[in-house]
């Protein structure tokens, strides 16, 4: 497997576009389309929030029941959540509009929205945007990049990646894009993520791969602990790589899963590191835990703590906050038998052992914590399970962004 | 029952002091003592964090097994958490020192600490502080106030209250103090809280009253979602009111519980409203929920959300965040059947109904949210259970305080 340039248009047969539709933002691209020239199989994972946005309900239905899909229409600015029956009608009209223009059934058109909750989408501007998208869509790396920029809200950078790998002698390509960067605490899914591939695979194995993957990728990140109403991750496979279809577990399935995981981890880390107001990617790695689930819970508890996040922002080795966050996670362990290390490009340092602080230099520790990517490594000495979670620091800008996000 | 001036020294036979011991802070009182001239029964609730500070372990043992207690020694600045065996030895030495000077057994001396985790307490300064405290302790309202000031860390105001009530013709007094204001997300208890009363009550009923009380008082507040290693709430009763001893449920027990709840709710609200960096007390009230536990979970989910907290700070009626926080709480409900109202001294407004926004004025809503005490009221239309939770807004100052708390 090798990383290549590109995103959602890297794989054969995928086209994309990003256009200005003035849904809410002005003078920037705010609508995107991903389109496959041939029908795709699709897998999806969605928010576990009881309050589900209309596009989530629309897509869940299609992922479960549509014979195939071929396009996704995305807008930023307005989330189409808490919008009642009118919100569902707009989803249907979006799909109808795109379906007619593309010459595909409305049940082949997925929709996704991100932005402010509680506002209705302006249907006229959305349909005008879809017309522009259908006209603008094209193959090639640049088109994918345009799409990845159009789905940003408070993101500071667009997020895309692509890889190439072999399945039984055939070259397969997979690419993806996603957006953060607030209300990020995915549960069964992430904010908005789209992955395309030309692999030939059964729908069942496609969904199995995605569902298994998110547990250790998107579900292990958090910016602010708020599980969105709109979390949607879609994986579309159009089969143009012409490999022998993957229909069961085995070497080919494993190769596919490995490539998928490379993409999801890349995007998940990007999303965490570009969390609202973030100055650093904050990674918690737990090793030698009793069970995998314990390791996940411990790691996630550390990156979700406001106090550990503020300490990272301040480059302050207030290590008690890290141990405290392990302690209230719900996992049982012996605090006298945990080791904590800080790691970054600037070095590695043993901070806490056998229930007390190690004899370390505060100044050196602060240097390690000042890096743009910081890891807190916890050795639990209980078993051999491990997990990693990704978050970001808590800065003044997080407060600023969210105290007047709508204005 | 009536509220009276005072705190932990309001009840008969209780003395207190607050002194400068330079444990970590300079030029301010940082050690406190509460003392009863006669032996007390004691009840306590403590942190559920797996990582428990040494004083928590010391006090749990005494609350469970000591025949009586008579004094509490408290310091701020250093938490005596993550301090291993040396930390436990220091607790014992604190109790021995105070016990010798007061002429009571060391097993009658409770200890409590709050401040930075991971530093050892300076024993020489602690014992010098205890000598000063024993000399300075005295009855009277002012002594209680001094004690309540000495236990502050990042608190901006001291927190105390007292009430007087009748039990079968005898006047009973109860008073309390507590401190916040970061790492506040009590689970079975609060940061540090001390309540004294001269009621005569059995140990069993005393603990029963306290354990039942915290579920809807201290356990319903949160500043930052971080359950501390040091949470301790102690309730001491010395019997000097000379009422017929309360040994079972009934009218007298109910009267006592009512007074206790008045005190705990007052202190809990004070603690939430004085959360680190807070500009407002943020209350979430859930009514007509299916069960009491559902109501508690829903209310707490709303006040714990970084995004609702930032919206309150910005006086921004971004109501979707409130509904979103209900949605990921884990409680099942129909989003189309929830009503949301904002309430404060500046007015009351219907914001969300039947799955969509009400037709309200953003300007008027912003005025209501600009009050120093703001309530979000949710009517779930499912049953008749209700609960209230208290938090605070998320401000620049929260980040500032916690990015360089130790410096």
Image (tube, coloured by chain):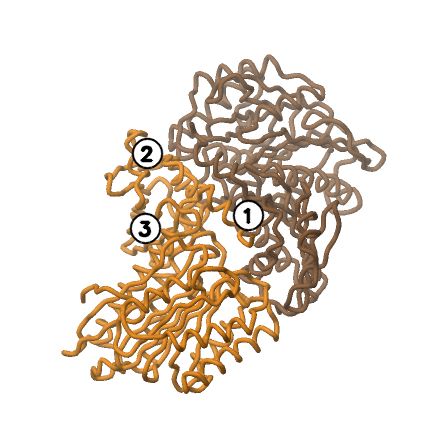
Chain colours: A orange, B brown
Say which residue appears at 41% left-offset and 64% top-offset: A150
Name of the residue lying farthest toward the left = A169
Sequence order check: which comes first, mark 1 or mark 2? 2
Say which residue appears at 54% left-offset and 60% top-offset: A116
Name of the residue lying farthest toward the right = B169
Q: Residues within 10 Å of mark 1 (few under 14, many from 20)?
A: many
Chain bearing tag 2 is: A
Name the residue that disc number 3 marks.
A286
Q: Position of residue A60 (x, y in %)?
A: 47, 76
- Drawn side of residue A92 relative to residue A278, left or right: right
Name the residue that disc number 2 marks.
A366
SS at mark 1?
Answer: helix
Q: Nearer the viewer, residue A192 or B237?
A: A192
Q: Position of residue B45 (x, y in %)?
A: 57, 41
SS at mark 2?
Answer: helix
Name the residue that disc number 1 marks.
A403
Q: Nearer the viewer, residue A89 or A19?
A: A19
């Amino acid at each position: 497997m090798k990383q290549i340039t590109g995103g959602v248009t890297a794989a054969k047969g995928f086209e994309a576009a990003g256009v200005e539709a003035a849904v809410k933002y002005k003078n920037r691209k705010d609508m995107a389309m991903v389109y496959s020239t041939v029908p795709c199989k699709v897998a999806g994972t969605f928010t576990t929030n009881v309050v589900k946005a209309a596009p989530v309900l629309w897509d869940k239905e299609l992922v479960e029941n549509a014979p195939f899909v071929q396009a996704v229409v995305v807008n930023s600015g307005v989330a189409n959540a808490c919008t009642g029956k009118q919100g569902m009608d707009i989803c249907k009209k979006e799909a109808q509009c795109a379906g007619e223009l593309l010459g595909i059934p409305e049940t082949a058109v997925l929709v996704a929205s991100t932005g402010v909750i509680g506002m209705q989408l302006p249907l006229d501007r959305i349909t005008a945007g879809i017309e522009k998208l259908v006209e603008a869509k094209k193959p090639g790396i640049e088109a994918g990049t345009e799409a990845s920029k159009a789905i940003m809200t408070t993101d500071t950078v667009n997020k895309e990646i692509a890889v190439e790998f072999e399945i039984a002698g055939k070259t397969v390509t997979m690419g993806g894009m996603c957006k953060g960067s607030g209300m990020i605490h995915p549960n069964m899914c992430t904010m908005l993520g789209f992955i395309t591939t030309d692999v030939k695979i059964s729908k069942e194995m496609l969904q199995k791969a995605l569902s298994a993957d998110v547990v250790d990728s998107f579900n292990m990140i958090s910016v602010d602990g708020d599980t969105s109403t709109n979390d949607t991750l879609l994986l579309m496979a159009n089969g143009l790589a012409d490999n022998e279809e993957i229909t069961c577990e085995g070497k080919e399935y494993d190769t596919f899963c490995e490539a998928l995981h490379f993409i999801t981890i890349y995007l998940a880390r990007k999303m965490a590191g570009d969390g609202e107001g973030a100055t650093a990617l904050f990674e918690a790695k737990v090793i030698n835990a009793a069970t995998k689930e314990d390791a996940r819970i411990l790691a996630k508890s550390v990156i979700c703590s406001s106090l550990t996040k503020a300490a990272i922002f301040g480059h302050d080795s207030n290590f008690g906050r890290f141990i405290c966050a392990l302690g209230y996670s719900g996992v049982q362990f012996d605090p006298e038998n945990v080791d904590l290390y800080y790691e970054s490009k600037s070095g590695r340092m043993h901070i806490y052992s056998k229930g007390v602080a190690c004899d370390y230099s505060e100044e050196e520790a602060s240097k390690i914590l000042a890096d743009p990517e910081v890891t807190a490594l916890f050795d639990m000495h209980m078993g051999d399970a491990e997990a990693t979670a990704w978050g970001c620091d808590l800065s003044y800008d997080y407060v600023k962004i969210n105290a007047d996000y709508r204005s």
